[in-house]
Image: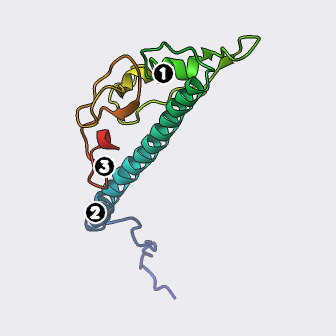
Amino acid sequence: MRLAGQRTVPYRAPHRGFTLIELVITVALIGLLASAVLPLASMTIKREKESELRVALREIRTAIDSYKEASARGRVKVDVDTSGYPPDLKSLYAGVEDIGSPDKRMLYFMRRLPRDPFYPDGTASAEETWGLRSYASSPDAPQPGADVYDVYSLSTDKGLNGVRYREW
């Protein structure tokens, strides 16, 4: 009931939205969660790169061993005073002539040369990303030479296991 002369006050809905304090607390919580997630994300990325490095080293070293075996079987031309290991990494994927084949087919030891995932320059060729050790070089101080006996990463960083990548 409305009395005469009284005005009706329209009903106001309560204000909807967030207060400044609620927004500050929300932003602080998101920041806290993000600061906890970033180290995990960077460790995951490093672990993936380490896995790529392991696979690449295994692939290249297997190809080097296959080349050496082919040269020992007389399928690859080798000079008398050489070790029988490939002269460069390009020989592994570009191919060499199979001298044991009557039609002089090419022997390929890998499809492509993988890159070192820890090499900083993304524009460098895959061959430039690896350190080379020749057969005549000592394992403690690897040096390139007339052949490729082994490869190693040029990175000076340590892996998650505490071992430097060049020693893998």
Mark 3–mark 1 distance (CA, rounded to whole Å): 29 Å
Q: Alpha-carbon neighbours of circle 2 within 10 Å: few (<14), some, or many (≥20)? A: few
The mark closer to the camera, 2 or 1, is 1
Instruction: Tell which residue pokes out farthest to the bottom in this image.
Output: 1
Q: Amino acid at mark 1?
A: Pro
Amino acid type of the residue tagged 3 in the rendering: Gly
Query: Residue 99 appears at what percent x and percent y?
Result: 66, 14
Q: Quadrant of the C terminus?
A: top left
SS for dot 3: loop
Separation of marks 2 and 3 at Cα, in angstroms: 28 Å
Please tell me which of labels 2 and 1 falls first in the chain: 2
Residue 12 drawn at (x, y percent):
43, 72
The residue tagged 2 is: 32
Task: Residue at 32%, 64% (x, y): give it.
Answer: 26
Is residue 6 positioned above or below 131 on the image? Answer: below
Q: Is residue 23 visible?
A: yes
The kind of residue tagged 2 is Leu
Residue to which mark 3 is pinned: 159
Most extreme residue toward the front is 80
Task: Say whether residue 123 is visible.
Answer: no
The label shown at residue 121 is none
Q: Is residue 11 above or below residue 116?
A: below
Q: Position of residue 125 (x, y in %)?
A: 43, 19
SS label for mark 1: loop
Q: Residues within 10 Å of mark 3 (few under 14, many from 20)?
A: some
Residue 86: which disc?
Answer: 1
